[in-house]
Amino acid sequence: MASITFKGHPTVVLRTYQVVRIGNNELDKTLDFCLNDKSVAKLHATLTRSERGLFLVNESSYGIVSMNGQRFSGPILITFRDAINGIVYLRFGRVEAFLRVSGSLGT
């Protein structure tokens, strides 16, 4: 199981093959999370759940994405092994998110 939480937004449970779009464009109705912060690009990142884990992709040419304090620019595979006490700490620009993962996510 996996779910993602941003402050001020309801928690979203991620289903297999679901794509979550994260950005800062209130006019874009395809965004699952619209974050009102200047450090977040219009389409900042996508998070896709697969049978192997979660694929996090930095879709922005200038935006910062980090996992557990480590910045990255390309796609990254997240599994339960990346969790610290069941939580993967994500950052999109200056906005924090908490990704809760269980042992059934990836191997």
Image (cartoon, rainbow, N blue to C red):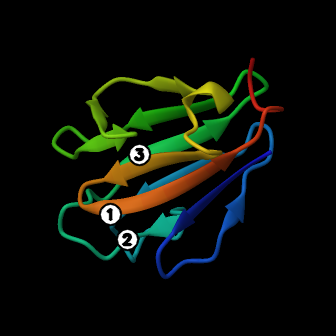
- Whether residues under marks 2 and 1 lie with C-beta atoms below 8 angstroms apart, the answer is yes
Mark earlier in primary sequence (2, 3):
2
Between circles 3 and 1, the one closer to the viewer is 1
Mark earlier in primary sequence (2, 1):
2
Residue 71, position as x, y percentages in the image: 26, 33
Q: Quadrant of residue 84?
A: top right
Within 10 Å of the Cα at label 2, are there few (<14), some (14-19), or many (20+) other Cα atoms? Answer: many
Task: Give the residue pinned by disc 2.
Answer: 35
Measured Cα–Cα span from mark 3 to mark 1:
12 Å
Q: Is residue 44 above or below residue 83?
A: below
Measured Cα–Cα span from mark 2 to mark 1:
8 Å
Measured Cα–Cα span from mark 2 to mark 3:
11 Å
Camera-side residue of 83 and 54: 83
Residue 85, position as x, y percentages in the image: 61, 45
Within 10 Å of the Cα at label 3, are there few (<14), some (14-19), or many (20+) other Cα atoms? Answer: many
Task: Give the residue pinned by disc 1.
Answer: 95
Task: Give the residue pinned by disc 3.
Answer: 45
| Residue 42 appears left or right of 107 | left
Q: Is residue 49 above or below residue 39?
A: above
Q: Which amino acid type is marked by label 2?
A: Leu
Q: Which amino acid type is marked by label 3?
A: Ala
Please tell me whether mark 1 sits on a helix, a strand or a loop.
strand
